[in-house]
Image (cartoon, rainbow, N blue to C red):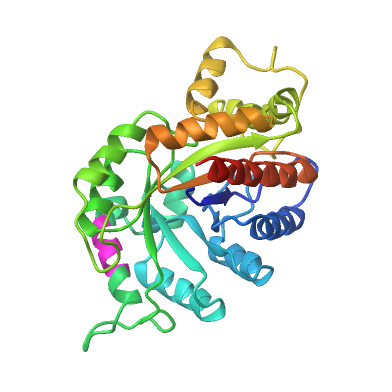
Amino acid sequence: MVPFSILDLSPITRGSTVSHALDNSRRLAQEAERAGYERFWLAEHHGMSGIASAATALVISHVAAGTKTIRVGSGGIMLPNHSPLVIAEQFGTLAALYPGRIDLGLGRAPGTDMRTAAALRRHMEGSANSFPNDVVELQGLLGTPREGEVIATPGAGTNVPIWLLGSSHYSAQLAGMLGLPFAFASHFAPDMLFSALEIYRERFEPSAILDKPYAMVGIMGVAADTDAEAQYLFTSMQQSFVALRRNARGQFPPPVDSMDGLWNASEKGFVDHAMTYAIVGGPETVRRKTQAFLADTRADELIISMPVFDMEARLTSVRRFAEARQELAAAA
């Protein structure tokens, strides 16, 4: 059975604080570790009042310090926002603090609106276009130092595993060309999932990192005791995506009994499409839909984002997905 992992954005729930969100991320990772998940990733987003993981390397350290065995990393660091040397130093430090447990997932989107992106990137015009070169530079900085080249200290020689993340064909092609593992953001961008996976697998070149393709796929997931309870909990994410569509971002909202009156037909269509591969339900529904999705994608790993307002319900969802994985493995 393929490994299951978790993607977290450290959601700041309505009426809560950043401190509470960061503590919840650590609790979530601890539960994931107990339940046998492979890795726990945090995403870089900026200028969003409902997300506490902007300083991603710091949050990774906070989570890794509270766990013992689960891999912790970025899903991802938006590399155009940073110089490769800074990221090499940050993740080299993390690798020294938590040996053998740090992952470095990289994306090329800004992770924010364009005004905030300009503030982040300052004088780095065209930085998104230099993404392939920056990835290669970062690989070098984390690898064996060469005489005469800039040395990342910490960083050099750590060989922190690099993943490429994407929601289109671009990173799929680059990951294949560089022989790196690839993660597709199908948890919110479903359109190119299968074509990107096909491109990645067809164009994969064996490397010192991998001898064959390794593809991770993402889903939004809410698992509860019943389908009705899971659908109720999922309305928090639906509201959040409606707010995103309206450019009215706020703290993560509590669930509601019905979305009627909270979205119009166009907004509903937008959210339903973005959530094409969401797995929301009780144990049988989660097991059945997960099995089908993994069979369709032939994924090597599944990473789940669990957008649940109530922390105890979020922890229950972690356990329910782990149970589904165990049952699927037993039946294989």
> In this picture, is 236 found above or below 177?
above
| Residue 133 within the magenta-colored segment of the rendering | yes
The picture places residue 64, in percent across and down from the top left corner, at 62, 68
Q: Is residue 49 above or below residue 88?
A: above
The residue at 23%/64% (across/down) is 207
Q: Quadrant of residue 29?
A: bottom right
Quadrant position of residue 283: top right
As for residue 171 lying within the magenta part, the answer is no
Residue 248 in sight here: no
Please state if 275 lies on the left or on the right of 248 as rendered.
left
* Residue 49, above or below 44: above
Q: Nearer the viewer, residue 168 or 113?
A: 168
Residue most extreme to the bottom: 147
Q: Residue at x 53, y 35 (%)?
A: 290
Give the dominant element type of the magenta stretch: helix, strand or loop: helix
Q: Does 191 sit left or right of 111 as displayed?
A: left
Q: Which residues are magenta?
A: 132-138
Residue 332 drawn above or below residue 209: above
135 to the left or right of 305: left
